[in-house]
Image (spheres, rainbow, N blue to C red):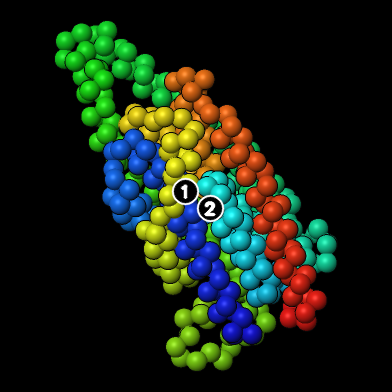
Amino acid sequence: MLTLVLTVILAALVFEFINGFHDTANSIATVVATKVLSPGQAIALAASTNLIGAFWGTAVAKTIASGLVDTDVVVVTSQVLICALLGAIVWNLITWWRGLPSSSSHALIGGLCGAALAAAHNNWAALIWSKVGDAGWTSNKGLLWKVVVPMISSPIAGFLLGVAIITLLYVLIAGMSKAGGLLARLARPRWVGMFFGKAQFVSAAYMGFAHGRQDAQKTMGIIALAIFAAQTEGALNDLPAWLSFLHPDGGKDDIDSWIIATCALVMAAGTAAGGWRIIKTLGHKMVKLHPIDGFAAESASATILVTAAHFGMPVSTTHSISTAIMGVGFAKNPRALKLGVIERIVWAWILTIPAAGGIAYGLLRLLEALGWA
């Protein structure tokens, strides 16, 4: 049993590493596309800010650990979690290879739900659909409140906020041009480009921080769930001294410090590995970006991510930045958007949860057929 727990932790960290390089593009595509930073500089910035963001709260991790699967209905074994992670990893690698910015968050959620459903022998009660909290809607649990609602609302919010920010910036610049004098000179394209070239460094850091705060926590939740399940079965009662750090509560009530630190470091390492295929799709293929556009898109996306993380909603970094870029492009010129690329991205979004869930479901069924689960 202990070997299986360690295997889950290893698989979770592999997912976290892949999440890092898969979603690196989400946090740095715009700053690379606008040529404000070189790819190497952008990756260094993203890795460091991812690390900081990962330590900033654990609400999303708690949602993954205890808000989606009803452990009173289905026993979440190490095999279930391994299949969940493999489902997410396989789908992430497929979409990375195809250059599609699909959601690692939804891949993990889909994998967890698919494996749990297989373990429950198709008893849908194993999945928490909706559970109303005592402290208002923000404390509600379940797939409806924590996955479905933000999955629909966050792309819309990203698009609208992208439109709003870039529109506001252009209105301010137009006002400065009409004011004359020094303000008019500062509103010239050369000075605007220089200013937002500097400002985008800040918005890129904000985006990296938001990415770390959202995505690193999802793997923390899986590891915490694995340890809690192992403790419930008594598998961690007689640990050797070198594994004694596994024995705290494991995340049922809080996420242990070693889980936070490990996931943060592994994700930062994955971020440093980069993901250039997706950067090309996000930063170049959807719409041509300038520094002011990148600033608007990153600011919009990061705000969505940080807000969702505060309420424990595992929102997709991919969805928020992609739709923010679309919103910026639409505000500038609706015809500038390349609808063929956007269509491919939307299909990747739609397929992610069922595809990762289907892979995880099939893997657990295979393990059961082989007598290993």
Can residue 263 be seen in the rendering of this structure?
yes
Can residue 131 be seen in the rendering of this structure?
no
Q: Which numbered circle lies on residue 96?
A: 2
From the image, which quarter does the N terminus lie in? bottom right
In the rendered image, the vertical position of residue 368 relative to residue 39, given as above or below: below
Position of residue 296 measured from the top left corner of the image (x, y, whole percent): 39, 31
In the rendered image, the vertical position of residue 29 relative to residue 53, given as above or below: above
Q: Which numbered circle lies on residue 182?
A: none
SS assignment at label 2: helix
Q: Which numbered circle lies on residue 277?
A: 1
Q: Which tag, 1 or 2, sits closer to the chain's start?
A: 2
Position of residue 319 measured from the top left corner of the image (x, y, whole percent): 55, 41
Q: Which amino acid does label 1 sit on?
A: Arg
Residue plotted at (39% across, 63% down) = 269
Residue plotted at (44% across, 20% down) = 332
Q: How crowded is mark 2: few (under 14 residues within 10 Å), some or many (20 or more)?
A: many
Is 195 positioned to the left or the right of 205 in the image? left
SS assignment at label 1: helix
